Each structure stands twice: as structure tokens, then as C-alpha cells.
Image (tube, coloured by chain):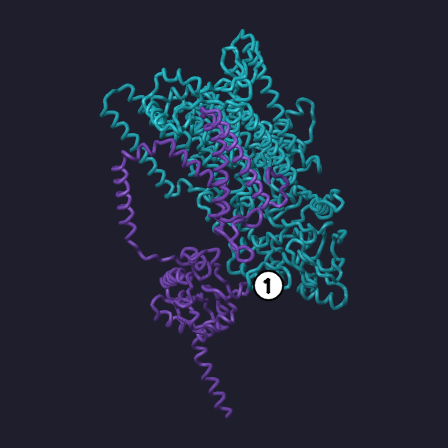
Chain colours: A cyan, B purple
Amino acid sequence: MAPKTAKSPAKSARPPPSSSQQSFDNSIPTTPELETVSPPNGATTTTISSPSSSGGGIFPTFLDGKGKRIAYPLPSGLSPTAINNTESLLRFVILALICGAAIGSRLFAVIRFESVIHEFDPWFNFRASKVLVNDGFYEFWNWFDPSAWYPLGRTVGTTLYPGLMVTSGLIWHALRAINMPVDIRNVCVMLAPGFAGLTAWSTYLFTAEMSTPSAGLLAAAFIGIAPGYISRSVAGSYDNEAIAIFILMASFYSWIKALKTGSSLWGMVTALFYAWMVAAWGGYVFITNMIPLHAFVLILMGRFNNRLYTAYSSWYAIGTIASMQVPFVEFLPIRTSEHMAALGVFGLLQLIAFVETVRRLVPGKQFQLLLRAFVVAVFVVSFAALVVLTFSGWIAPFAGRFYSLWDTGYAKVHMPIIASVSEHQPTAWPSFYFDLEMLIFFFPAGVYWCFRELRDEQVFIIIYAVLSAYFAGVMVRLMLVITPVVCVCAAIAFSKLLEAYIDPSVPSDPAEETGAAEDQPISKSKAKKMAATQQSKPFSFTGLLGGKSTSGIFALDTRFAVITTLILFLFVFVHHCTWVTSSAYSSPSVVLASRNQDGSQNIIDDFREAYYWIRQNTPKDAVVMSWWDYGYQIAGMADRPTLVDNNTWNNTHIATVGKAMSSSEDVAYPILRKHDVDYVLVIFGGLLGYSGDDINKFLWMVRIAQGEWPDEVQEVNYFTQRGEYAVDERATPTMKNSLMYKMSYYRFPELFGGHPAQDRVRGQTIPQTPIVLDTLEEAFTSENWIVRLYKVKKEDVIGRDHKAVTAWNGGKKLGKSASASSSAGAGVKRGRPSM
Amino acid sequence: MRPFTLLSSLLLALPLTLASSAAHWSAIAAKSKDGIIKLDSQSYEELLALDRDYSVSILLTALPPQYKCQPCHVFDPAFNSVAASWRKVPKQVREQHFFAKLDFENGQEVYQQLGLTSAPTLQFHPPLAGPNRNSNKLSVITYELNRHGLTAPPLHAWQSGLTPQPFSLHKPFNPIPFIVIPLGLITVAASLYSMRQLLVPLVQSRIVWGTGSMILILTFTSGYMWNKIKGAPYVAAGPGGSVSWIANGYSNQLGLESQVVGGIYGLLAFSIVALTVFVPAQSSPVKQRIGVYLWLAMLVVVFSLLIKLFRIKNGGYPFGLLF
């Protein structure tokens, strides 16, 4: 391939409009590597020429059947069909192995722990899938969940993207249909790895359209194990992203296919994948804007043609109607700004197609000018209409999450909940390297190749690359979106580099060819340059700068050196990916693991312990209040109503919980009682050193509460005079009196029996003064104290104040800790960790 | 002596009772140009009387040039414009909330008493008596300058939620943008049109677009947006007064650091392109061999440096190439 591409004309800025047909011809997948160098049918032997000093120096050169010089002997006597068949078989086997590797590398968590659903959101998706499978599709569609967002409830059917659950439900039914009764949990756990295999396959197809099948295989291998994608698709990570990346790549592939062939069938396939994507993930907006942007850039480059028209129109018409079938989306495609680009480009394409048709039928220069003016005028008018509609409120302006990508300060001020999520933070460079390793610098090289060739589909890659680089920089979560394009570009660059050094043809030596070259007709500019170089005899350029360039590698040792280095890079890449997956991305976060001193594994299962305790020891309708992170887990594992959960649709409700957590007992107790709260759950990592605990998230609770009640909660009051966030002696009174602080450190110093009570997350010493809880009593604390559960006391039977009750009890039972009263309906169970 | 003491204490109490009345402060506020009460240490105490039935926003600032308080000067107009907007509400409501300003020059005691070490500080004091009193509320609310910034709109949004009645921010009409912006647009359009001979090839140039995209990609993938959003410093002072350009911690970085990383990515990508395109184009076998080894060495060495740099950031990283 190298000889062909290296000489591709890159001088002209862009091909004139008339050459679009030609550029299309170029885009037909070039025949694979081996075929171009294989000898023609009937070639007999490879002759070994005598070692010549001119070619490689030390190494002998060989001649192929045609008499061309090649660097190493090739097998001869193979028919092209045999080679073709071998190639297809090899490709199939390699792709199958890549899929196997992609699935296998995602199974760390299943092997280490068990087949368990991970983290937070997957627990809700799992619960919804169970409803779908057990109660049927229509029950799921109309599902109202009274236990979430107590007492408001949540209409689940119309507030989620059902694609994920429907997908796993279909798989479950299909497996049952072939007499393989599999637990729905196992389907959910294994869904992400399975779709990762499909992603590798679709990336192969996509890259093969962009470059060569060999680059496609490399891209499939890269995406199969790239940590940027694994982070969201390990076994058990049953989230929308698990299937979304496959659908993303599949719809991009079919879009490219539709654009290249101009077939409305492929346009429809794109639309169907798009509809699936809309049903599965909020990130569908990326496709909604990528495809119109690509079409728009192609129009600007003067590459409008009927294929583009057919592909885009069929995609837009079918895709939009299909996407409107999702209850959560409904009329958004015609009423929000995110979707207006797609609509605008659709209109523009119709206009241009109309004008082109008229121009073909009616000649005349003035008339054409008029038509052009007409197009521009309509474009301007419709854009103005869009602006007017937006300002008049008929079309919603950019929604919060999407808008915060552009105005990066917006979320911090207006949407503290969105800003509080760690995956919405911007990305520092180590994250890029961590998730992509060497791909990150092969990526620009691949973009270079796209610019060099710049066919229609490569324009797509370039737009995708630049846009997703920006998005990934703004939000850690969107590393997921950049990973496929990085893999594709890196694979293109990598395979070009490999091809350049594997290609067996050896260029002819300039010394031998000087006589022949002078006879050949040469261009003027070349002749000038040659004359210039000949005049300055002592030193002359011989490469690109000299104007006469060959293409190919002479020596074998350099080939060997480069290829060995690249293979070494690949090995390091595989090791890196495996290490990252195993150490960073395979933790279910529901179950934790630590190493003992002797190297054996210690499983920390506090979350499930506590949730099962709640399930078995509390009444079915007991309302559990916790910070929203744990809402889905409590609903999924403990099966109890919660006040707030990870859906975060009601900011006020979340702020209410934040206020209760950050206020003193006097303020918090009425809030708890008004919301019928029976239990309060906090996560505390101070004993074990688990850093993702509630005290570390506490400032966000304060901030969100402050957003609603700026005159009752204030962040500054939780910092010491010197601006430190302290939990030891220096902690402010507001901090020490807050419900969260009290519940986290209640009886904590007692564990240390007089020694300083060290909080291992904050590295601070907790004061020995016993914390007194008047309105709450401890109900359960898990083995490593990670989960602590408190029961909310009812109003006193004889109408006393809770403080008075505590004082009364304290006075009566002097010397005993005030809260060890055994009046709790659910007895106190406490696990002591081995220190 | 007894009657005298009684009388004198009465006399002393008289101005105090006067001082804590809303009407008194309203008169003072009306006298000043922008409706802001200028305070000193004594009137500060008087304004914040314990039986006040009005709320107060007090800006503690340090405007005189000898204090060199740059943010004070930036924040001052914002505060003034918000205070001036409050004057637009009806008199009855206006008397329930006051804007006041205390300069460090006149109120060092207050600064000491509050333990304040930085200016400006804006504090809101809710009413302690009267119908607007709310026992649940904080005794003093500090405006968070770090979070909201020094401009008027967020200040107004904060203030408007605390005053007895929300009010709108009054902006004086500024005609200059309405003249300058269209003029500027016309000038730019005209100059672009006159230079079209030069610009059209530039806009259509593949090299220009390619270089631009490449720079954008390298900038973003080296963490530029992180620096911009988090406001990372360019370099930081290391131990012993030295200048360090690498930030500690995996999810932390400095301006120079991300630029170096961007440069490394660019260099590595260039080496790859050189090995693929430039070296095979070399028609002299000897020079080609030198080229291959040079670029290959560059690729391996710089990549090893990158891994080394990453190991500094992430201590537990087990891999390395040369170093």
C-alpha cells in the first residue's frame, strides 16, 4: 500500500466539486496487502540473486516472479483464490480471537468475587430488568414505582431509556426459547462483555471502510482491550454505556456505508441503529449532531451529491420518527436546540437538491446566481426563525447537561448536583494516558493520514476526532466517546507504519537508475530542483527535500528493528491494559477487596451485609434516608423505600436530604418526621480508610442544601477559620453538631479504648468527648463500620422533648452511655473489626 | 449623684435607640449618593443592634491605595450597582434592608473582632426582631467570593434571595456596544472581502485545516481544559524555593506540565509520521538507514520519558521502557 499512498497528490487544497465522483472511486476498499505483491498465477520460483552491494548492503535481495526486487522470499505458486480464502479465514479467526480477548479481559470481577451487579446505576437497571422479565413488557412500560422518591414516587416507564432492559430481556427470552434457562442476573452481568465483543467487530468494519482490513483488525484489537472502554463495560457494569458504544460504532459504520453507496437501505439501517441508541443512552445526541455536521462540512467542501442526499434524508426521516417512539424522548427532536442542527441540515439538503435539479434543467448564468442567492437567503431566514423561536420559548434552549459542555462554568453555578458527580469533572492528562496508553500519540498520526487522503469518510473521522477530544477534555465520563476514534486512528497509523516496513518490494537503487532516469520526461519543477542540486555538488538532498523520492525500505536490518520495536510496544500495551483493568476498573464497589499482610485477599462485604440486614430486620414499608448515591442500592438490595436516588430528577428533594444531614438535630428531626423517615443510613470509611464515604461527600450535601436555603445552611461554617475542612478538635461547632458528623463518629473513639481515635481517611484524630444523639439511636453498624444505620425515634409518649428524655435517662443511669438503651424495636447488632 | 447617673445613662441610651431604628438609617442611606451607609467601628456596632428589625448587607473592604487590594476595587462597582438597584423598590420595603460599607481604614477594630484577614468580605445580617425574624436562620451569612466571583449578576442573585423582597438588577444603559459592534462587524467583513484573494486559498488549504485540527487534538488530549476549568497555575513553588512543573497527585496537573505532555505527544506522532512517510521516501540507502535509526530512537526514548513522567504521577505504575 505504501507505494500507492505515499505518492497521492496532496498539493491541491481540495478536490474541485467535479472530482467528487473520482474521490468516490478511490474510496473503494483497496485490495489487501498480500494480494498486491503476490505473484501472478502460474509464477514458478523465486530466484535468489547474488548478494549485491547496492541494494541493502549486507543482505541478499530476492526477485519475485515478475523480476522485481523484493526483500525476502515469498511463497510462490499460490493462486489468488487460495490467498483470498486464506485471508478471509485468517481475518475471521483473528476477529473471533479478539472478541474472545475482549470478553475475557472483562471478567476479572466475576472471577474474583462472583457474578454480581456493580456500583449504583446498574442496580436500578437490574431491578427494572427484573420487572420487565417477570411482569411483562406492558407492566414495565407503565411502571410506577411508589418506593422511590418517597413520598412522591417515580413514573419509571417514561423517565428512563428502556433500550438496555429491552435488549437484555430479548436475550433472556431468546435463550429460553432455545431451552437455556439463564437467570436474568447472569444475562445482565454478562451483557457488557458480550457487547464489547460486538463493538470490536463493528469497529473492524468501520475501520476497514476508512482504511484497510488489516487496520480494521488492529482497531478491533485496540478497542477490545482499551481501558477507556473497559472502564464502562466490565462484567456486572450493567449500564446504558455497555451497549451504547456498540450501537454508536454500528450506526457510524452504516452511515459511512450509506454515504459511500448512496443506498437508502443503508440509510435505513443507520436510522434503526440510531433509534436503538436513542432508546438506550442519553448520549445519542452525539450521533444526532455528528452526522449533520459531517453532511454540512461535506456541503461546504463542495462535495454535495445524490448519495449524500439519499443517505442523509433516509436516515433523518426514519431515524427521527423512530426516535420519537421512545416515551422519554417524544417530541424533543422537534422542540429542543440539540436536535435543530439535524433538522437544519435536512432542510439545507432539500434546498440544494432542488437547486441542483433546476440548474441542470435551466441553463443561464444569471439564473444560477439567482438560485444561489435564493439558497443563502432561505438559509439565513430559517436560521433567524430558529433564533426567534428559541427566544420566544417554543424551542427549548440547550438543556443543562449538554450546555455545560460548552460553558464549562455553567454547571458549577447552576447545577451543583451535576457538578458534584466525579465523572463530570474535567480530565487531567494522566487520565488520558491511563485509559489509552500509546494510542494517545498514535492518534494524531492517524488523523494525519486521514487528512492526507481526505475522502468523504475520512472527513467524518476528523470531525469526530476533534469534537470528541474536546468533550473528553471537559468531562472524564466522555473518555468513553473518544476511545473508539482513538482506536481507529491509532490503528490506521500503526498499520501504515507496519505496512511500510513489511512491504517486501525494494526500491531500485538510484545509482543504477541515473542513466534511465535522465531519459525519462520530468516535470519542470523537478528539473529545476535537480539542476539546483547538481549545481551544489558537495551536498545534495536525496529524500523528499531533494525532489526525487523513492518509496520503500532498502535494508532488512532497519525493517527488523522497526517491526521489533512495534511488537514490543504492542506487548507493553497489552500489559498496561490488563494491569489497568485488573487494578482500577474491576472493582464492583459493592464488594471491596484488600490485601492482608501475608498477601492473602480480604473481602469487605459491608454493603451487602447491611442491606440484607435491613431487608430482614425492618418492616417492609420502613423508609430509609441516605444520600442519593445509595438510593438505587437500597432499593435494589434492601428493597425499602428511599427518599432520593441516583435519578436526581428533583433537586429540592435532594436538597432537603442535604439539609437534614448538614443541620443540627433540632432542625433535622422535624424534617425526618415530616418525611416519615424510619432509618438513616450513612457510609463511614474512617475505620477502614475507605475514601468514598459520606464525610468526604459532605460538602456537596451542604452546597446543594445551600442552593435551596441560602439563609439556613452555609458552606463557610463547615470550614475552620483557616479554611480547612477538619473533623478533629478544630472542627467548627456547625460541623460538630451536624447530623452527618454525629452519625459518622458516634461512639467511634470508644473503639480505641483510650488511644487517640484516628480517622484513617482524613488522617485526623477524633475528639474523645462522647457524641450524644437525642433523636436517633444506633440500629446497625456493619463489620468494618462502613455502613451505619440509625433508627429515628418517635415522639416521646408522654410528650417530652428528646433532649429532656436523654437527660432523664442519663441522670438515672449514670455511668452508662446515653444511647445504649435497648428500647429499639430492632436490636443493636455490632460487628467489631479485628484491629 | 444618683439622679445624675440615671439621667446620663438615659442620655447615652437615647442615641442608641435612635440609631437602631430603621428610619434613622434610612435617612442616612438616602443622603448618600448610592444608598450605601458608610460605617466606622462605632456605627458598625450601632447598625447591628441586637433588636434590629431590618437586615443589613455589609461590605468589609479596603479601598485606599496603600492596601493594594485589587479584588476590592473589582468588587466595589458590582456592590454599588446592586445597592443602587435596591433603591428602586418602594420606600416601605426599602427600610427593611440596608447596604453598608466599612473600610479597613475606619474599622480596624471590627476586622480584629471578626478575625478577618482578607478583604473584601460581604456579610448579610438577618433581622433579629420584628416580623421578618426567623429563628431557624443563620446569624450571619457570608457571600462566597470564591464560588460566585466578583461580578454583579451572581451577587444580585444571592442578595435578591435574602432581602425581604426580590428586586431586579438595574443596569445603566450603555450605548457604546450598539455602535461599536455593528461597526466592527462591517469593518471585519469589508477587510475580509478585500483580502479574499489571499484568504480563499487559505480557507481551502488542507494544510491549514490539518495543522489546526492537530493542534486542537494535542491541546485537548494533554489536559488543557482541565487547566482552564480548574484554573491551574502555570508552575508551582517546590520545596526549598525551587520551581516545580509537575503537580503531585494523579488527578492534578500544572500548566507547564500539560504543555510538556502535549509537546511529547506531538513529537511522538511526528516520529511515527516520519518513519512512515519521510524515511521510505529517501532514495539513498545509507541515509535511509540513518533516518530509520534516528527516528526510531527518538520514538523509543521519548515514549520511555512519557512513561517515566506518568510513573511520577502514579506511583504504583509497574511498567517502564528504558528508564
In the rendered structure, the answer to whether residue A87 lies left or right of residue B79 reads right
Q: Give the answer, above or below, for where A764 lies relative to A462.
A: below
Q: Name the spot of residue A778 as percent of width and height, x first.
A: 71, 55
Can residue B249 be seen in this snapshot?
Answer: yes
Outermost bottom residue: B1
Name which residue type carries label 1.
Thr
Can residue A681 be seen in this snapshot?
Answer: no
Which chain is home to disc 1?
A
Report the residue at 49% width, 14% height from top. A68
The residue tagged 1 is A732
Q: Give whichever of B286, A63 is nearer the camera.
A: B286
In the rendered structure, the answer to whether residue A558 lies left or right of residue A604 reads left
Q: Please tell me how crowded label 1 is: few (under 14), some (14-19), or many (20+) other residues with Cα within 10 Å.
A: some
Report the residue at 28% width, 22% height from top. A359
Quick one: SS at disc 1?
loop
Which image quarter holds the C terminus of chain B?
Answer: top right
Q: Give whichever of B64, B159 is nearer the camera.
A: B64
Outermost front residue: A538
User: For residue A538, what is the image quadrant?
Assistant: top left
User: For residue A434, what is the image quadrant?
Assistant: top right
Q: Give the answer, above or below, for where A512 lies relative to A426.
A: above
